Image (cartoon, grey):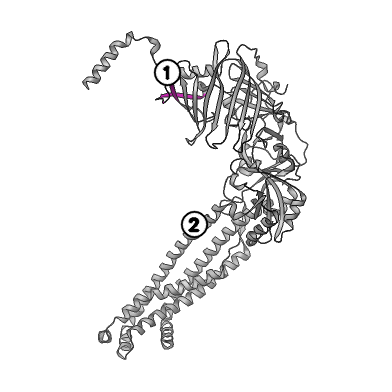
Amino acid sequence: MRELLKLAARNLLRNRRRTLITLAALVLGVGAMVAVHGFISGLQGSLVENIAEGQLGAVQVHKKGFMANVLSSPLGLDMADSPALRQKMEAVPGVRGVTPRIQFGAMLSTPDRPVPEGREPTAAEQGKTSFFLVFGIDPPSDQKVFPRRLTWMAKGQPLTASDSDEVLLGVELADGLGVALFPHDAPRPPETERPALLAPDRDGSLNGANVEVVGTLKAGSPGDRRYGFVGLATAQKVLRMEGRVTEYAIAVNRLEDAGKVRDALAEVLGPEYEVHTWAQILPFLKELFGTQDFIFGIVAMIFLVVVLLGIVNAMLMSVLERVREIGTMLAVGMKRRQVITMFILEGLLLGVAGGLVGAAVGWVAVLVAARIGISLPAPGATAPSVIRPTVTFLYLARSVGLAAAGSALAALWPARRAAQLRPVEALQSA
Amino acid sequence: MERRFLVAAVVAALAPVLPAAAAEPTPEQILAKYDAVMGPRTFEAHSSMTAHREDGSERTYVMRLLKSENDKFRVWFDEPAAVKGQEMLRSGENMWVYLPNLKRATRVANRDSFQGGDFNNADVLRVNYSADYTGKLAPTDVPDTYLLDLKAKTTNTAYDSIKLWVKKADFQPVKGQYFGSSGQMIRSAEFSDYRELDKGYVRPAKVLMKNELVKARYSTMDLSELKLAVDAPPQRFTQADLGR
């Protein structure tokens, strides 16, 4: 066997140009596969980070039953907010920050533009009303849990205080309403010239507050762009829910530990509450990633098959060139099985070498790209984020294994052709 | 073929002697009659709306309504305390809600929910189907009724299409089904308690509006009092009058 391996290696080194070309194809194929995989992982990672650090938090705490009823009347499933409760959650190992929120549906209604006395405003001059999903947030703790959202400001400034009359809107929503941004500290105009936030309160009765839009936000993930933010205390007043919230968003030190932190929080909080990770709140995301990985897997396979067909071709050439030599080997008593093994070993050696170098090249590309960072919006987002490709050692090992096994398999047919030669005819061929 | 020709000939021969009253009214005529029942030219009424939610909670709103010609409408809320002082105004295509704590009126749309219940603003403040929908007669499954298939003329209407069952005898509505833009039924209504609320004026005093999207939700609207001959001066239907 060792002799055969030596022979196989020597055979590969005999026609260096052909071996190099075959190797180059393998290196390119495996390298590209690793690099693209790393890029896709990076994209998925940036989307998850945007969601965890800009929208949901890594973990969320609700009143028991909230998630099951989230589409109907989530305001009814609220809970008392207290510093003691927040501290209890902050004390859980792995928790980086806790912020209270209320999620609710509301309308933003802009005033009519001023028109001369006695004339009705035209359709274009009339105020507009738009439905949107609003988050009542507590600015200081919110910024701790959602540091990324500050980087999504399109224009204007973030909210200053929980009881302010300031509102942030998604940039598409703000454009649709045609609202002008209002500077934080400017004196407020008369009531009739201000936008109003209208919402049914906890019992369904309409209530509202005069507000000013102080900033707009780009989107950090795909989905509905009709959303906005308002101070928690203002939201509580409109909803007539003083001192109450519908959820806590929780940031963790390491995103991979979200599951552990969830379990620890559930333990501390008891059965009145329910705790979910971002992946449980957005189960479609995991499915999306699964689909992406599947499609990429198919593309990578096709890529690899093309490369391997090149190997088949090169080795067939090699068999044809070495007909006399194979005849001699068979004539001096080499077994057909050994001839097959020799050619398969040649393929295997090619595959291992090409796979190793390719994986290394891909890995270095991923490391360099991760170091520099690719500035690009996450899938479906409008806010740019820095994508840092990643690849696991398991994936690198799998790529090398795949290349080696594939090349060995590709050598099978040429090997059989060689083994089926008849020594007498082979020796006579020119 | 011959038989059909024969029937046609007989019908044609008899047509001039059939009494004119037996002729089917056109969809437009039925719709106009429906509008006259549900939204007479002027009236003042007291009414209450109860919204039932899927968690079992309910809330009753007590209000006063005032309608004038040309699609002018006012609503004053008296109860519960959370909405006391709130008012609504409709003038033609424009609709506002006045919130006392904002001290101003805000525009609202036909399709917006009326006080978080299952009626929308147009259900309450705009009864002018002739203006908003075109009708076609369809085969009815309820005896002694016409079934009207209504299609919205514009996208600003409360619904995209409506199926409305109206009694043949007096054009009182029996039930309705209301559809959204996807063709999905979003609400269904049942009309009951037909009463002579004013001299010679009969209408259903109770409307049950069921939410077909969240089945456990429904709202009822009850008219307790209604006067047709009322003074409704135009200045009451202006933004300036809100909150006065």
Say yes or no: labels 1 and 2 on the same chain.
no
In which quarter of the view is residue A255 placed? bottom right
For residue A429, above or below residue B244: below
Name the one closer to the observer, A48 or B189. Answer: B189
Q: Which mark is residue B147?
A: none
Please indicate whether residue B93 sits to the left or right of residue A351 in the image: right
Q: Give amino acid for label 2.
A: Thr
The answer for which chain carries disc 1 is B
Q: Position of residue A419 (x, y in %)?
A: 32, 81
Q: Which mark is residue B26?
A: 1
Range covered by the magenta-colored residues:
B132-148
For residue A197, above or below residue A216: above
Q: How far apart are labels 1 and 2 at the CA level?
A: 56 Å
Q: Is residue A116 magenta?
A: no
In which quarter of the view is residue B203 placed? top right
Picture mark count? 2
The N terminus of chain B is located in which quarter? top left
Secondary structure beneath label 2? helix
| Residue A157 in view of the camera | no
Q: Position of residue B199 (x, y in %)?
A: 57, 10
Q: Give amino acid for label 1.
A: Thr
Name the one closer to the observer, B14 or B126. Answer: B14
Residue at the extreme top of the image, as rendered: B17
Q: Position of residue B131 (x, y in %)?
A: 51, 22
Q: What residue is disc 2 on?
A: A291
The answer for which chain carries disc 2 is A
Q: Is residue B138 magenta?
A: yes
The C terminus of chain B is located in which quarter? top right
